[in-house]
Amino acid sequence: MAKRVVVINPNCTAIVTEAISESVDVYRGQDARIDCVTLEAGPPAVSSYFDRSNVAAPLREVIERETGADAFVIACFGDPSVLAMREVARVPVLGMAESSFYIAMSVADMFGIISTTENATRRHHRQVRELGIQSRFAGDTSIGMTILDLRNDEEATFERLMDAATRLRQAGAGAFITGCAGMAVFRERLERELGLPVIEPAQAGVTLALGIAAMSTRR
Amino acid sequence: MAKRVVVINPNCTAIVTEAISESVDVYRGQDARIDCVTLEAGPPAVSSYFDRSNVAAPLREVIERETGADAFVIACFGDPSVLAMREVARVPVLGMAESSFYIAMSVADMFGIISTTENATRRHHRQVRELGIQSRFAGDTSIGMTILDLRNDEEATFERLMDAATRLRQAGAGAFITGCAGMAVFRERLERELGLPVIEPAQAGVTLALGIAAMSTRR
Amino acid sequence: MAKRVVVINPNCTAIVTEAISESVDVYRGQDARIDCVTLEAGPPAVSSYFDRSNVAAPLREVIERETGADAFVIACFGDPSVLAMREVARVPVLGMAESSFYIAMSVADMFGIISTTENATRRHHRQVRELGIQSRFAGDTSIGMTILDLRNDEEATFERLMDAATRLRQAGAGAFITGCAGMAVFRERLERELGLPVIEPAQAGVTLALGIAAMSTRR
Amino acid sequence: MAKRVVVINPNCTAIVTEAISESVDVYRGQDARIDCVTLEAGPPAVSSYFDRSNVAAPLREVIERETGADAFVIACFGDPSVLAMREVARVPVLGMAESSFYIAMSVADMFGIISTTENATRRHHRQVRELGIQSRFAGDTSIGMTILDLRNDEEATFERLMDAATRLRQAGAGAFITGCAGMAVFRERLERELGLPVIEPAQAGVTLALGIAAMSTRR
Amino acid sequence: MAKRVVVINPNCTAIVTEAISESVDVYRGQDARIDCVTLEAGPPAVSSYFDRSNVAAPLREVIERETGADAFVIACFGDPSVLAMREVARVPVLGMAESSFYIAMSVADMFGIISTTENATRRHHRQVRELGIQSRFAGDTSIGMTILDLRNDEEATFERLMDAATRLRQAGAGAFITGCAGMAVFRERLERELGLPVIEPAQAGVTLALGIAAMSTRR
Amino acid sequence: MAKRVVVINPNCTAIVTEAISESVDVYRGQDARIDCVTLEAGPPAVSSYFDRSNVAAPLREVIERETGADAFVIACFGDPSVLAMREVARVPVLGMAESSFYIAMSVADMFGIISTTENATRRHHRQVRELGIQSRFAGDTSIGMTILDLRNDEEATFERLMDAATRLRQAGAGAFITGCAGMAVFRERLERELGLPVIEPAQAGVTLALGIAAMSTRR
């Protein structure tokens, strides 16, 4: 029987949900149904620790309503309220950043994160330490652009992404994680140019969710 | 297009290959073809570091022959020659122990390994350290039985498995890994009784292989 | 000029706030004003990850209202929403568990935590890892009693506390943390009997808050 | 009753003792008496591991003489003989570097140290490792000036301090420690300019000493 | 040309020096001269942190006097003042505990320490952390006897040593370190009985000293 | 009785064996016989993980044939099949990279590796993590030359070696390891110029092998 994964974009920006849905389309099939939903009660973007905490209540509502889900993915790189949602849900709940780390670790000894702005770096260090995987972490490099600027001049953006990846590779990275949903469209080209795996976190979260749902006896 | 994963049992014992094939059946489907092969040139069991090294040459032959594979899983808990095979293969190569660690880490803060005999414990400590995930590792507990004894008295075996899991849970484990192919048949019952995830490594390897193959542009 | 610390009990149980206030009385003085407030909108107890996230919004209200505070202490051993409140507050915000760890580390090489029930143990492991201080952590031992039972038979409780401390000392602990507000009344006797420091987290949070407020130029 | 902290400058340079006394003045009050003493038998500066060992005997004399102290602070960034003095003293003994690390960790995820010369860097790495807090350590940056040069051209010194802090911030530091008593006079200006906490180690040692003395039943 | 190693017993108990000299006799030869000296000005035993610091001055005198030495070994398990003596000496200075750790790590994945009394355990934890080798450390087990009691009933002592080693082996140790000079006489028998390496620290220090002296261009 | 160490160069390039033999000549003497052998069945160079695994079988043959050896050194910086050979040999087996790390750690707080090309860096990171000594590792810097180019222009090579060492020293290294047999001829000059120890791995392996053979009762 097909497994159904519900991907929750914890911000209220529907265009991000659409980008996520497009990215994870590769996993849809006869055995896998993937529904991407927008958290209407969420903020426009989940960019602070306060936002990460504050989406717990509306996320719980979605999870309690989606009784037909076999697994959930919280699709925001901050993995907001994932531990809280694991208490609430009767099925597995995956965070997309955490998932991308493990997928990267499955294919390379060390991974690096490409971020939009420097503000994210400090938080990523703490996330990686909380998960106890610092020795697999080659670093976090930002390209100095917000999500809104990524599509302005795609060649310029691509060049910055390559620069960031090159610096991370010199620091030991053998796989790269695009730390922003807006970078998903550049993933394939980056991977081909670098000749090394580039992981898109929403894909990472969904494939783990499908795989874990299939092996689980919970529900 | 369906992805095809080739699972290589690196020992020459066909009955183990069959057990693996049965365990991963849950992942077969219209989008996923999974072929399990026995390494004819391998030893009856891969239980020493020498065996782990020595299977490199015959494993390479299989990998070079299987040009239609989208990913490989080396299906032995020692993850023998996985780094070497990644150099050889043009597609992702997953080790099943490493995969089981990451799947366990995706659903719980700390994991424990249930082993057959005490001999395995020292090696598991080194494996976990090599992967840099010691702080997620609650320990390794053996049940004092070889793979051959597991089916003699299934109730007695199950009791020992529960004892081992209970000790690991007290040490902080929130997920459990069955460190021997022969334990696969007890997985579901263990999971239900414990109320916590029990991971079967071949399943972990296969689901990661399928997921990574689908996101990869390599080949 | 006297510094004013506002201690927020993030649950709505006023009797806990009173116990905290009594415990930190030792720091009140001409130079130090300490106000303990109850989070009316909080749950009766903050015992889950969901509760920890969910108190962010009401905590922010208190912090935004208490414009005269020189520092805040979130007085719950889970350190709920501390990172979020640091974004919100213009003055230092201390978590009481984190504070107790650092105070213990200031007087001993390794510390141990005495908990009420086993449920807390897993969470404490993650807290300690997130803070990157695992190698100073001798362990967490529970006494198998809830906060409600602690005063039923004080001699029996004290005996269990001593048992837990003794096991932690054998594991290397040179200082002990009482992981529950209800244990504060036993602190002095435990310290005298053990001949080693026993840290009460609310005291730890308040003294750090006063000290940091005094050195800070913020506001 | 007021607590009395004795701060021992383990070198024989009285002007350093005066600078320390001035820095910790913020903690003096009706409840807190702070006496700063110079170790007459100490070397002009404690800059080698030999000096750190060699001050043990004269430090013990001071500690045994100061029977009215409620806590001691060894006011040298090398934390010389702190472990030895804890054996000797009947009250808490704090090292000022160690104290500054914990105070920094109480307000930021990662901290950096600003040193005078490169010679100190190697020793700080070992100190941080000995304390097991490497994952909170963003690094150590020297300004290439000795303590004697700091006041020659204060604007030039301040510029170098800002440069060092900026590099540490890029490496993830959210709080900064002035690794030399002579930098204390620049602390406030640095903190205002950076908008992030700058910790002066003598202040850190004294506030922990006062706080721990107040909670302790020892004596 | 033969290398000359000077082994300094930092306590004033000549009988310990003799035991050390006998133990390292295996390394004496045409190419290796080993002189063992007693620190007359040292305490009867170096058992506290204060003693470790306080021997720095007399140790320096010996080192400055022994101008013909190619390397020094400080022969006390606390590795007292080793860092300080490295500043003073123009040739390599080895600590015997540190040396025994590295020799053990050269032959086994994890090592354990057998101590006399429980007092040593805490200090060993800190030593191991300071050296950054915790993940190779299986633990420290004491036999509950002082150095003076070891020869009273040798069979009883041997039994306790075997018990301690057995517990350490269960914790993962593949090599064992005798943490007291008085245990040297039991080394060979222990090693044969266990079938695993048992390291005597004075031997470890001397062989590293000889080897490093031979490769060094210093002097 | 003299100890005999057999050093196995696991590649089939005899000129490398000769360089190794010359380097370890300093340890030959009346008490120490050192035989260096070339693995005829090995590859021209052991540069991949596949090669590391694949030399296990021919290495075992050498070890089983050399029944008169008191210890073996596998003389390749990748430490190929060392764990496997420990299972096979009845005497100690040392890896030369691992040995060089411990020798470096015996004389300095942190060490750095000077490599030929960047390809080695990633593998060294994993080697260091597997051994659990990351916090002693200051980094790995390559000079961008293959082993074949080192002797072309010796002054230019020396300059690059000094550059690499200087960068590693700035990162905290107090000892340096020449990560390629071809660098052995530059060791002494580097050490004199730097004023800090430079370790040649074959020497490190041989001295540990001799020392451990002398203390061992195995055989």
Image: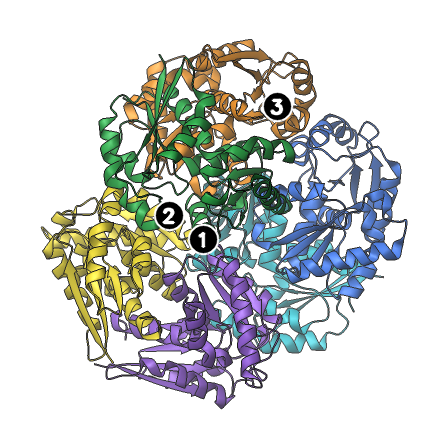
Chain colours: A orange, B green, C blue, D cyan, E purple, F yellow
Number of labelled discs? 3
The reply, left or right, for residue E145 in relation to residue D64 is: left
Instruction: Answer yes or no: are tags 3 and 1 on the same subunit.
Output: no
Residue at (73, 30) in percent of width and height: C51
Q: Nearer the viewer, mark 3 or mark 2?
A: 2
Residue at (47, 69) in percent of width and height: E177
Which residue reaches farthest right?
C152
The answer to the question of whether label 2 and label 1 lie on touching residues, with beta carbons closer than 8 A, is yes
Looking at the image, residue E163 lies above or below residue D196: below
Q: Secondary structure at mark 3?
A: loop
Question: Looking at the rendered structure, which numbered label has been put on residue A91?
Answer: 3
Q: Position of residue A110 (x, y in %)?
A: 39, 38
**Crowding at mark 2 (Cα within 10 Å: few <14, some 14-19, many 20+):** some
The reply, left or right, for residue B125 in relation to residue C161 is: left
Q: Is residue A115 visible?
A: no
* Residue at the disc numbered 1: B119
The reply, left or right, for residue E155 in relation to residue B148 is: right
Residue at (83, 40) in percent of width and height: C36
Q: Position of residue A159 (x, y in %)?
A: 32, 22
Task: Name the quarter where the N terminus of chain F is drawn.
Answer: bottom left
Kindly identify the amino acid type of the residue bearing the numbered disc 3.
Val
Q: Nearer the viewer, residue A100 or D123?
A: A100
Q: Secondary structure at mark 1?
A: helix
Looking at the image, residue C215 lies above or below residue A80: below
Kindly identify the amino acid type of the residue bearing the numbered disc 1.
Asn
Q: Position of residue D6 (x, y in %)?
A: 70, 67
Q: Nearer the viewer, mark 3 or mark 1?
A: 1
